[in-house]
Amino acid sequence: MTVSTDLDRRFRDAADREGLVDVAYDLADSPVGELLVAATDRGLCRIAYRPDDALEELAGDFGVRVLRVPRRVDDIRRELDEYFEGRRREFDLEVDLSPVGSFHREALHELARVPYGQVTTYGALAAKVGHPKAARAIGGAMNRNPIPIVLPCHRVVGANGKLVGYAGGLERKELLLRLEGALL
Amino acid sequence: MMEATVTIPPFERFYAEHRDEVYGLLARRLGRQRAEDAFQETFLRALRAYPSLRHGEYLRAWVLTIARNIAVDAFRRERPAAELEEQVELPKRPAYAELEHLTEALPPTERAAVVLRYAYDMPYSAIGAALGSSEDAARQAASAGVRRLRRKETT
């Protein structure tokens, strides 16, 4: 016997209302494919290009009570839509980076300051964090960015200006940079 | 012998896997209308206890036990004098099959506590959630059940 959509939604909302959810998520359509968008009480904690693998990762990072609760990520989805429509250049979202180590977190904070439509290099970002020789480590930190798009690791390129790499695939990186007008 | 520990799945996967069966069980026992409240209560209880689970085995048995207990309570509230048939729908496995036979004569709560504890190796906090009571009450129900079984054995 199948649970009705209405009953299913009521359970999800009740679970959220009672504060029993460690991580609430939903799927969102976007020009770079379907995204999984997830939030804890502290804020946006994950944007995943591969939704299928993300649930286990979220459970490991934030707790096993991972539940799809669409209305909990409404704000995030709306800001992403605006971004993809070219109507938003900065995100006004709280983020939860609690599982991220200190070097990684510093790199992500510095990354968040790279403006819309501009690019920087791994080396330059390393210098900003105070470790000018750590370009490779910065590359690793970008590769493990839990909140791509909002924390704009697509704006970091190689010293020669090549796109180099992107955890979501170079096609996505290129598309995001074109959207922002950084690649002409 | 302990079996290899199965990781606890993210709640969404557990919920998606069992929701239809749980709803089916509740609808058969309570009718569709009343099954809706019971459904919500079942998964809320499961969600409350979920972080206290120690492994991901027998989750189906666990959630069906929660659902059955909620159905029994709802049924009793409506028809206090009615005879209840306690159907057990736990999957068969050797440890349980044996316990099922041995525990037949126990009251439903003690039986559920004994089976979940000793056949499924669940922590008392999760059993408490399944029975709609506390960790302590679950521990007491299990030990009362075991005492009752011992008395039965020696007579």
Image (cartoon, grey):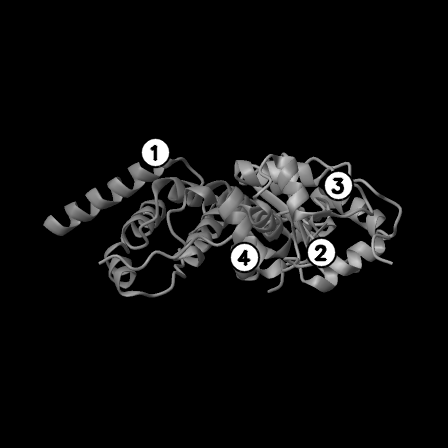
In this view, the mark in front (4 or 3): 3
Residue, disc 3: A114
Q: Is residue B79 visible?
A: no
Say what amino acid the circle numbered 1 marks: Asp
Spot occupied by residue A174 in the image (x, y as percentages of width and height): 77, 60
Structural distance between the alpha carbons of marks 4 and 3: 37 Å
Say what amino acid the circle numbered 4 marks: Arg
Structural distance between the alpha carbons of marks 2 and 1: 65 Å
Quick one: label 3, few (<14), some, or many (20+) residues within 10 Å? some
In this view, the mark in front (2 or 1): 2
Q: Chain of mark 2?
A: A
Residue, disc 2: A160
Residue, disc 1: B136
The residue depicted at 73 percent of the width and 58 percent of the height is: A173
Do the numbered discs 1 and 3 sit on residues whose CB atoms are within 8 Å? Answer: no
Structural distance between the alpha carbons of marks 3 and 2: 18 Å
Q: A10 or A139: nearer the eye? A: A139
Residue, disc 4: B13
Tell me the SS state at disc 3.
Answer: loop
Tell me the SS state at disc 1.
Answer: helix
